[in-house]
Image: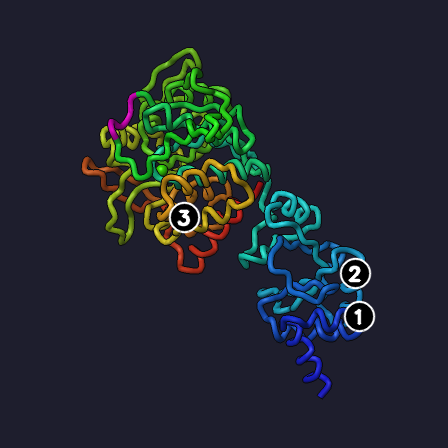
C-alpha cells in the first residue's frame, strides 16, 4: 500500500502545479520517491529536487562524487551532495549491467557545450546529456591532434556553411585544428563569405584559398555569396572581415601546397565537401616556392586521410554532383591520389533525411540579431530547408570512424567517365563509404548539428 502511495507521489512530480503546492519534500520521502522513479522512468530522468521540477533544457553532467550509486541505501548521499551543489539528481539505467544509477548532477546552459564537456572529462563521465534534445554527447573521446583542411564549394547550398560552423565549434572544444579553408567554387565573393565566417566565429586568421581555374558557371542553389557585402540601413557593413575587399586569396591548390609543406608527415585530414578541382590541381602540380615536392609526393607525405562528400554506392540511384560537375578534374583526382591514403565517402543518401528547416535555423540562432547564416535565411531563403550533407564528412573527420557511422568494408573506388563511382571490395583497399543510418540515427545527428549551431 505504501508503495502505491509513493508511486502516486512520484507520478505527481510530473504534474504542473505540484511544485507550488509542495515546495519542501522531506529528504527521507524524497529518497523513497527517487527510488520508485526508476520504474516510472526506465529510460532515465533528471529532476531539480529543490523546485521539484523536471528541467526542460540544459546540459547535464554527473558529479564524480556520486558515481556508482545504485543502491537504495546510497540515495541519501546523492541527495545530500545535490542539496549542497546544484540540487539536481539524474537517474539512468546502464544497459550493460541493468543497474539503475542515481547521480548528483551539474547543469550547464545549453549553449555551453565546451564547458560541459570539459567538466564531464574532469569528472570521468562518458557523456553530457542534452535535456531538450534528449541526446547524449560523448565526452570520452580520445584527445587527438586532428589537423583539417576544409575544401568546400561555398556559395550555393548552405550545408557548406553548417559544416564550416561545426569545424569552428570543434575548434572551440579543442577537438581539431582548422589549418585552412579552400573554396573550390570560383568567384571571390565565395571566399569573402568564408572571410565573414572566420571573423564571426572568432578565427579571423584562418587562411582561405580560392579556386581560379575550376568549374565554369556551376549551378547555384541559393545565391548567398553576397552575404559578405551586406549593409545595415545606415550603409555600414553588417559583418566583420579580415581579408577585406582589397585582400588577395591564394589559388586553392597553392594554399594546399603552402599548408601541407609546413605540416608534420601524415598528419593532415582533408574534409572535401565540394568539387575536387583544387585537389586535382594540387595532385597535378609541380615543385614551387612552398615545396620541392610534386603535388602527388606532397599529398603522399603529408596527408593522413580524406573525408569526402560525394559518390553513389549501394542501392542509391541519385546522381553525384560534386564529381560530375568537373569530370575531367575528378578523373585526374581519382587517377593520381596515392593509393595508401584512406578515403571515406559520404554519399548523398546518408544526408538526405537530415532536413534542417529555415524556421529551425532561424530559431536556433535567436540568441543574436546579427548572424551571417541567419541573415541568409531571413533575407534570401525564408521558406526553404537544407539537407545536411556536408556536415557528415566533417563529423566523420573529427569524431573518427567508430563512433557515428557504419562504414562499408574496404575496397577500391574508380570513377567512370560518366561520373559513376564503382566500388570493388578488397580488404587492402583504401576506400570506404558511409552507410545510411535509420530514422533514429538521422534524428540524433540532426539534433547534434543543431546543438552545435546554438553554441556561442
Ligand atoms: Ca558542398
As helix, strand or loop, the secondary structure at mark 3 comes to: helix
- Among numbered discs 2 and 3, the one appearing first in the sequence: 2
How many numbered marks have been drawn onto this rendered protein structure? 3
Q: In the rendered image of this protein, does residue 375 appear above or below residue 263? A: below
Between disc 2 and disc 3, the foreground one is: 3
Dividing the image into 4 quarters, which one contains the C terminus?
A: top right
Between the residue at mark 1 and the residue at mark 3, the CA separation in whole angstroms equals 47 Å
Q: Residues within 10 Å of mark 2 (few under 14, many from 20)?
A: some
Q: Which image quadrant: the N terminus?
A: bottom right
Name the residue at the left extreme.
418
**If you read the primary sequence from the N terminus, does the residue marked by circle 1 or circle 2 appear first?**
1
Residue bearing mark 1: 27
* Residue 43 disc label: none
Q: Residue at x 37, y 19 (%)?
A: 251
Magenta-tinted stretch: 213-217
Q: Secondary structure at mark 2?
A: helix
430 vs 102, nearest the viewer: 102
Where, by quadrant of the figure, is residue 296 drawn?
top left
Residue position for label 2: 83
**Numbered mark located on residue 358 in the image:** 3
Seen in the picture, residue 312 relative to 6 is either above or below; the reply is: above
Tell me the quadrant of ligand 1.
Answer: top left
Cα–Cα gap, marks 2 and 3 = 42 Å
Contact (Cβ within 8 Å) of mark 1 with mark 2: yes
N-term mark: 1 or 3: 1
Q: Does residue 163 show up?
A: no
Q: Quadrant of residue 191?
A: top left
Depth check: 212 or 420 in front? 212
Q: Is mark 1 within 8 Å of ligand 1?
A: no
- How crowded pointer 3 is (Cα within 10 Å; few <14, some 14-19, many 20+) is rated as some
Amino acid at each position: 500500500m505504501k508503495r502505491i502511495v509513493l508511486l502516486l507521489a512520484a507520478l505527481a512530480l510530473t504534474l504542473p502545479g505540484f511544485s507550488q503546492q509542495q515546495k519542501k519534500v522531506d529528504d527521507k520521502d524524497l529518497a523513497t520517491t527517487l527510488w520508485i522513479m526508476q520504474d516510472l522512468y526506465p529510460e532515465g530522468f533528471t529532476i531539480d529536487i529543490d523546485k521539484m521540477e523536471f528541467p526542460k533544457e540544459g546540459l547535464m553532467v554527473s558529479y564524480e562524487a556520486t558515481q556508482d550509486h545504485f543502491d537504495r541505501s546510497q540515495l541519501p548521499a546523492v541527495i545530500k551532495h545535490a542539496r549542497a551543489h546544484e540540487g539536481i539528481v539524474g537517474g539512468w539505467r546502464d544497459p550493460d549491467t541493468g543497474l539503475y544509477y542515481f547521480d548528483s548532477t551539474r547543469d550547464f546552459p545549453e549553449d555551453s557545450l565546451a564547458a560541459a564537456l570539459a567538466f564531464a572529462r574532469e569528472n570521468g563521465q562518458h557523456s553530457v546529456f542534452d535535456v531538450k534534445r534528449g541526446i547524449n554527447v560523448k565526452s570520452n573521446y580520445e584527445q587527438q591532434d586532428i589537423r583539417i583542411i576544409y575544401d568546400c564549394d561555398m556559395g550555393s547550398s548552405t550545408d557548406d556553411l553548417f559544416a564550416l560552423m561545426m569545424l569552428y565549434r570543434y575548434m572551440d572544444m579543442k577537438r581539431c585544428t582548422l589549418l585552412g579553408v579552400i573554396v573550390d567554387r570560383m568567384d571571390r565573393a565565395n571566399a569573402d563569405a568564408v572571410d565573414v565566417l572566420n571573423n564571426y566565429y572568432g578565427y579571423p586568421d584562418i587562411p582561405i584559398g580560392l579556386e581560379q581555374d575550376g568549374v565554369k558557371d556551376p549551378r547555384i542553389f541559393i545565391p548567398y555569396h553576397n552575404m559578405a557585402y551586406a549593409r545595415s540601413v545606415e550603409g555600414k557593413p553588417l559583418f566583420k572581415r579580415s581579408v577585406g575587399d582589397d585582400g588577395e586569396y591564394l589559388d586553392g591548390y597553392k594554399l594546399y601546397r603552402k599548408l601541407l609543406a609546413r605540416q608534420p608527415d601524415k598528419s593532415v585530414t582533408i574534409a572535401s565537401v565540394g568539387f575536387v578541382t583544387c585537389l586535382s590541381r594540387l595532385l597535378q602540380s609541380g615543385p614551387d616556392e612552398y615545396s620541392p615536392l610534386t603535388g602527388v609526393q606532397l599529398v603522399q607525405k603529408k596527408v593522413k586521410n580524406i573525408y569526402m562528400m560525394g559518390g553513389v554506392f549501394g542501392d542509391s540511384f541519385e546522381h553525384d554532383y560534386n564529381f560530375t560537375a568537373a569530370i575531367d578534374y575528378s578523373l585526374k583526382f581519382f587517377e593520381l591520389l596515392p593509393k595508401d591514403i584512406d578515403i571515406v565517402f559520404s554519399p548523398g543518401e546518408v544526408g538526405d533525411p537530415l532536413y534542417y528547416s529555415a524556421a529551425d535555423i532561424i530559431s536556433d540562432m535567436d540568441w543574436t540579431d546579427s548572424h551571417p547564416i541567419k541573415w541568409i535565411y531571413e533575407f534570401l531563403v525564408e521558406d526553404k530547408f537544407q539537407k545536411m550533407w556536408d556536415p557528415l564528412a566533417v563529423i566523420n573527420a573529427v569524431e573518427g570512424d567508430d563512433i557515428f557511422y557504419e562504414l562499408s568494408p574496404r575496397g577500391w573506388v574508380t570513377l567512370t567517365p560518366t561520373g559513376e563511382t564503382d566500388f570493388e571490395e578488397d580488404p587492402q583497399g583504401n576506400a570506404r563509404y558511409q552507410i545510411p543510418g535509420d530514422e533514429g540515427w538521422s534524428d540524433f545527428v540532426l539534433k547534434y548539428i543543431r546543438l552545435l549551431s546554438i553554441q556561442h
